[in-house]
Image (spheres, rainbow, N blue to C red):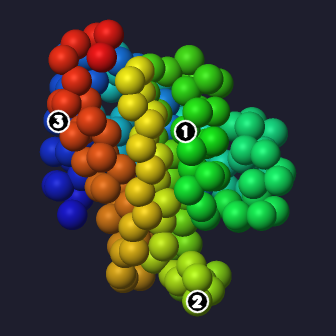
Amino acid sequence: MEETLRLLALRLGEALSARGWLLGCAESCTGGLLSSVLTDAPGASAWFAGAVVAYANGIKRDVLGVSQAVLDAKGAVSRESVLSMARGARGVLHADAAIAVSGIAGPSGGTPQKPVGTVWMAWEGPDFTDVQRFQFAGDRLSVKRLAVAAAMEGLLARALQTTGPEG
């Protein structure tokens, strides 16, 4: 899995560089693992702006701009939350594209509606905003690694669909 993550980070960095995009991330359940994997790629400073590790809801609200109403009504692990997190990350990090990840890595914290392994992700760029729910299996570290891989794959696919720096 580590080699897969390394190769994905390299490919994503190449795609972001080709588009002239700077990436920002908003991480919750991955706890900085996405940023760590990205910055292991040589030359990441050319395309990676930084990240907000918003593990606490107060950080999601106060730094990334997720409304308290969304947190109360939908929860931190929701479509609405990750959309706001991605938008907030783009703004606060002055990034062209953003990845946002929020989920329940386990082993506890799941509910029937949001079982352990539930992860929501959002990708936002110059000409796209997408969101997707994933259900990963495995222990806490496995869920985090699978989420990081899916996050990079998602942005890579979207970066390759565009035609140039302006989208």
Asked whether 149 or 40 is in front, the reply is 149
Label 3 SS = helix
In the image, taking residue 75 as reference, residue 142 lies left or right, namely left
Q: Which residue is mark 1?
A: 86
In contact (CB < 8 Å): disc 1 and disc 2: no
Going by the numbered disc 1, the residue's amino acid type is Ala
Q: Which residue is mark 3?
A: 11
Tell me what residue is drawn at x 25 percent, y 48 percent: 153
Q: How many residues crowd mark 1 within 10 Å: few (<14), some (14–19), many (20+)?
A: many
| The N terminus sits in image quarter | bottom left
Residue 20, image quadrant: top left
Which residue extends farthest bottom? 112
**What's the CA distance linking mark 1 and mark 3?**
21 Å
Tell me what residue is drawn at x 67 percent, y 60 percent: 76
**What's the CA distance linking mark 1 and mark 2?**
26 Å
Tell me what residue is drawn at x 51 percent, y 81 percent: 116
Label 1 SS = helix
Mark toward the viewer: 2 or 3: 2
Q: How many residues crowd mark 2 within 10 Å: few (<14), some (14–19), many (20+)?
A: few
Going by the numbered disc 2, the residue's amino acid type is Pro
Expressed as whole percent of the image width and height from the top left, the position of residue 91 reads 61, 23
Say which mark, if any, is on residue 112.
2
Q: Is residue 10 visible?
A: no
Going by the numbered disc 3, the residue's amino acid type is Arg
